Amino acid sequence: MSLQESDEHNFMFCQGCGENVQTHPVSVADRIERRCLYCGLVLDAQETTVETHDTVITVDDSPLLCGVLEDLLLERGLARSVKACKDGSEFITVLTQALLAHKPPGFMVLDVQMPIINGIHAALAARAIEKGFGTPPIPIIFFSVKKCDENFRKVLQFCAPAYYLNKGTAPTPELIGERLSAIVRQVSPKGK
C-alpha cells in the first residue's frame, strides 16, 4: 500500500457528523484540505473568528429545539437576532419577507424531518426564491438525526452552500453549540 493510499483512509472527528469519520484529501488552490468522506466538511480548517450576523433563520418543528438553537446562536455571538420557524411553510414566508425587505439572513438552520414541508423541500424552495430575487444563495446548515449518506451528499451539493449537523450525536446543548460554532466558522468566517 502506498503512502497516498494509506493517507486517504485517515480518520478525524467531524463536527458535522459528530463522530470520527474517514477523510479524503481535496486539492484547493495551493493547499490540500482534509474533508469528511460523508458530509464533505473541511476537517483541518484553521480556527477563525466568526462574523456575527444580523439575522439567522432557524426551522424546527420542536419548540424545545427552536429555543435551544436560538439561545446557542445568540449566546455564542453568531447572530444578533434569530427568526425561529416551526415548519417549512413558515420558513418560506419568513425568508420571502426578509428578501423583500432586502435583509437576507446570514445563514439558515433547517431541520430535515418536519411534517408537511420537510427541510430538503424547504431548501429547494429557498433556492428557487433566491433565484427569483436575484439573490446569491444563503448558506444552509441542515440539522438532522440521520447520518449523512450518499443521497444526502447530493442534496448538500445541489443546495450549496450547504452543510450538515447531526444533532443525534450531541446529547447536550453545549455539545451542539460547540459543533454548530465550528460549522458556522466555515460558513462565514470574519473577513470572508
Image (cartoon, rainbow, N blue to C red):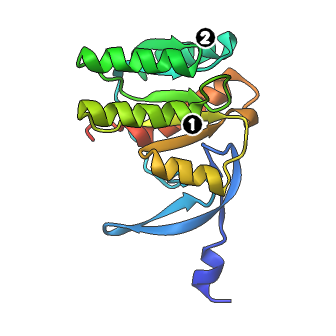
The outermost residue toward the bottom is 1
Q: Is residue 55 left or right of residue 85?
A: left
Q: Is residue 23 positioned above or below 117 on the image?
A: below
Q: Secondary structure at mark 1?
A: helix
Q: Earlier in the sequence, mark 1 or mark 2?
A: 2
Q: Is residue 85 left or right of residue 149?
A: left
* Residue 13, x across and y down, in percent: 65, 51
Q: Is residue 86 positioned above or below 52 on the image?
A: above
What label sits on residue 67 in the rendered view? 2
Q: Residue at x 36, y 19 (%)?
A: 96
Q: Residue at x 63, y 33 (%)?
A: 112
Q: Secondary structure at mark 2?
A: helix
Q: How busy is the neighbourhood of tag 1: few (under 14 within 10 Å), some, or many (20 plus)? A: many
Please state which of residues 107 and 45 is positioned toward the viewer in this rendering: 107
Q: Is residue 93 positioned above or below 13 on the image?
A: above
Give the quarter of the figure containing the N terminus. bottom right
- Disc tally is 2
* Residue 117, x across and y down, in percent: 59, 26
Say which quarter of the image contains residue 166. top right
What label sits on residue 120 in the rendered view? 1
Q: Residue at x 60, y 43 (%)?
A: 15
Please state which of residues 134 and 85 is positioned toward the viewer in this rendering: 134
Please state which of residues 77 and 121 is positioned toward the viewer in this rendering: 121
* Residue 122, x across and y down, in percent: 52, 30
Q: Is residue 3 positioned above or below 144 on the image?
A: below
